[in-house]
Image (tube, helix red, strand yellow):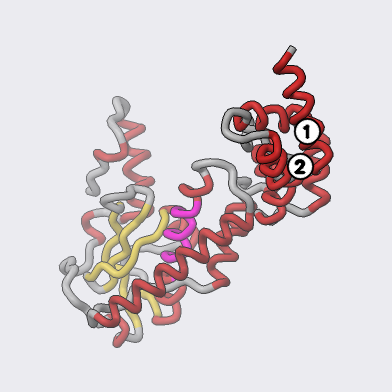
Amino acid sequence: MLKIESLGEENETGDLDARRLAAEAIYGSEEDVVGPISNSGWDFESEETYTITKLTPGVKDPNRVNVFLDGHFVLSLEINQVVDLGLKVHQSITKEKLQELQRASEFGKLYQRSLEWVLTRPHSVRETHDYLRRRQLKRKQLNRQREREEKKPLPEFDDELINEVLTRLIDKGYLDNRKFAEFYVENRYLRKGISHKRLRMELTKKGIDATMINQVFEKIPRDEDEEIIKMIKKKRKKYNDFQLIGYLVRQGFSFYNAKTAVEQYKEDDEV
């Protein structure tokens, strides 16, 4: 029967049996293997129908399943995709079904990469969309290089696949513009200081609409006077008054507020 040491050691025979049955429901048993397994070149596109001869756990990622057709490795899928698609050893696969599996495979890999990226810190939907477009462009550039080297191109993903990944991330709660905006306002240049104007401009560039920005500022207020003092303290030794006022204006503060704050801080410093 299928070896399942990777599923963890269990003391109870009943637990072992249950885990073995769960594994075999996905991967099948040793008796289910059909024909030899090969990774050698195989022109599967010339075939009209195929047979799933083996499903094995991924080597690098145990959450993925390697799919073998007619004894040859073809693609890998997430475990939940294998379950949802109802794939089994001995199952016959048409060319149309294979295209569906290939697309599902690319979706799973792209989704996993995107999930790892969004979990590094909160991101906006637009930021994530731009990240996915960069990966799309990088894959196209790589394929142009592979074409020059006469190598087989890697699968590319279209805008529809990008939108599907974004939708999944949003539905799962990994992407939330409001939570991102709150995190951004609460943490952006907390020690260095930042003007309200610049914060709003940055959030707008990241795809946050004006209404949401206003709501976030109401929930997480950042005192403009405190922010400008932070920046004056940081730059006072580097700039004279005229240069300091110009710097503050370029950072989004009004000329009046910048001039007043510089003069006031100078007076406080002299006391």
Q: Residue at x 83, y 39 (%)?
A: 256
What residue sits 35% from the left and 32% below the top? 14
* Residue 87 sits in quarter: bottom left
- Label pair 1/2, CB-CB below 8 angstroms: yes
Residue 74 visible in the snapshot: yes
Q: Which residue is mark 1?
A: 224
Residue segment shown in magenta: 103-114
Q: How many marks?
A: 2
157 left or right, relative to 30: right
Q: Nearer the viewer, residue 34 or 59?
A: 59
Q: Where does residue 56 sit, x and y in percent of width and height?
A: 28, 56
Q: Residue at the location (22% across, 58% down)?
A: 31
Q: Is residue 14 above or below residue 167?
A: above
The amino acid beneath tag 1 is Glu
| Spatial separation of the CA atoms under disc 1 and disc 2 | 9 Å
- Per the rendering, the mark at residue 253 is 2
Tell me if 71 is positioned left or right of 16 in this view: left
Q: Which amino acid, by three-letter code, is at mark 2? A: Phe
Q: Is residue 122 covered in magenta?
A: no
User: Which of 241/206 is in front?
Assistant: 241
